[in-house]
Image (cartoon, rainbow, N blue to C red):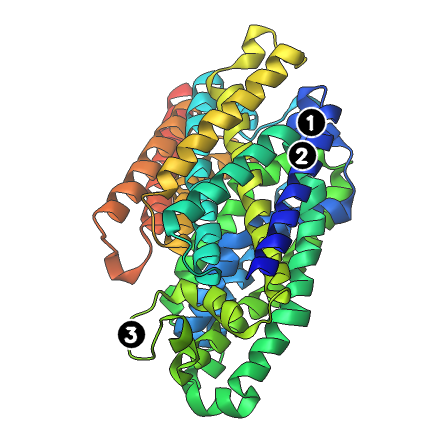
Amino acid sequence: MILDIAIFAIYVVLVFLVGLYFYRKNKTSDDYYVAGRNVSSWHIGLSVVATDVGGGFSIGLGGLGFTMGLSGSWLLFTGLIGAWMAAVLLIPKVYQLPGIQKMTTLPQIFEHFYGKRVAILAGIITTVGYLGFTSSQIIAGAKLATGTFEGFSFEHAVLLMGVVAVGYTILGGLKAVIYTDTVQWIILMAGLLFAGIPFAYDAIGGWPAVNAIANKDYLTLTNLTWKDLVNWAITIIPIWFVGMTLYQRIFASRGEKQARKAWFIAGLFEWPLMAFLGVILGLFGRVAYEQGIFEVVGYAANMDMDPELGLPVLLRTVLPHGLMGLVLAAYFSAVMSTADSCLMASSGSFLTDILRFKDKGLEEMDKKALRSSQGATLILGVIALIIALSLENVLEAMLFSYAFMVSGLFVPIIGAFYWKKATKLGAFVAMLLGGIVTTTLTLLEIQWFGLDPNLYGIISAAIVFISIGLIKNNIEK
């Protein structure tokens, strides 16, 4: 145990050193928020997939593998579709925008098409949505720590994960985020492929044990309903068109060709690679749980167990000391790769689109403005940490954050690029209505026909957006 903690502690120190290195390199807003606009395709692609999948989906996929088996991998298939659609339909449109070299946030695109008022509302939606997403990553890290280290309380784990993620992000900005994402993703893949999977497979007795103990449906790709797939698709595919973390990486790329290549790379890493690694480990966790292997750490087969704890408890149970510390660092790196990016997105939108620092003549990002950026990151990071203490389920928190942003932003951004009759009023009302419908139905736990509330938020936004556009254009004629 001491060896594992020592290895994990060394990793945390190294992460902070990377942040400190880039802290000394950051001179301008382009450095802090879009990494100097000079990052290669592979760094961008790995950073995109590390950010999108990250710790939350890693822990969430483990939970799906625990409860439904291999079919949980379809969750990230929607990520592949979203990434490739954005590469074809979105990125070329973004690079046609005048003034793209001065943009650092998604709401600035809204301002270009719809004006200042709509941009501020987009900034609010982005800031709030990514605060929730940052909180979900902190929970993922906390579950990882509590499931792995005996006697580590959830509250203490949340505080540890929050302090590390927030502190590192404040120091390094997007340069630190992107370049460490590449290393973190390699660490995670190596940890799962060469340690997690082999040791878990051996500990549970191999394929004969899986075949004998696991529900037969768990070993198929059809153990889900069409509603499951639709609900995942309507939340995850559109996020590739409205995710601030993704736009920051578009702006950080060297050009359109490099950005599109990065998105194709990211899609392939999401599915099948990460999708199946996550659900297979979750499935192995379910087999170990049914075998009673978890009894030594307090989870008997007849006890209720949080499915999202199955994966970290499995690693804690089957991995030898030392190696467990390495794999924990790998998973923590996944948490970091998403948490830091989401916090950067929230901070960037808050400062640029809500407080409007560029309107105050600070667009050159002198030392005063750079400190303001870091201060905003600190404040929002603390808020995310407080939110995390009140949440429980990682995947639910992530998908709700996604849904909140998608229902408010998806229709107006598609309209901006593809519908000439789009109007400022239509965009503003659609953003409000979409977010309100999704949030209200979610809080009231209403799912008409078993479909995600986000679908109804998007439909509501589309109806009002199109209606106002048609009416206004008819009046003008």
Residue to which mark 3 is pinned: 303
Q: Position of residue 169 (x, y in %)?
A: 59, 34
Q: Is residue 295 above or below residue 16?
A: below
Foreground pick, 2 / 391: 2
Q: Are marks 2 and 1 in contact (CB under 8 Å)?
A: yes
Q: Which mark is residue 48?
A: none
Q: Position of residue 212 (x, y in %)?
A: 45, 92
Foreground pick, 380 / 295: 295
Foreground pick, 456 / 63: 63
Can I make out residue 197 in this image?
yes
Describe the element under mark 3 as helix, strand or loop.
loop
Task: Say left or right for 168 vs 128.
Answer: right
Real-space Cα distance between discs 2 and 1? 6 Å
Q: Is residue 214 above or below residue 132?
A: below
Residue to which mark 2 is pinned: 19
Q: Which mark is residue 23?
A: 1
Residue depicted at 49% across the width and 53% down the height: 56
Residue depicted at 41% across the width and 25% down the height: 121
Identify the amino acid type marked 2: Gly
Residue depicted at 60% across the width and 71% down the height: 320
Residue depicted at 57% across the width and 35% down the height: 417
Task: Say left or right for 256 vs 310.
Answer: right
Real-space Cα distance between discs 2 and 3? 42 Å
| Among the 4 quarters of the image, the one containing residue 200 | bottom right
- The numbered mark, 1 or 3, whose residue comes first in the sequence reads 1
Task: Say left or right for 249 vs 446.
Answer: right
Identify the amino acid type marked 1: Tyr
Question: How many marks do you count on the picture?
Answer: 3
Quarter the C terminus occupies:
top left
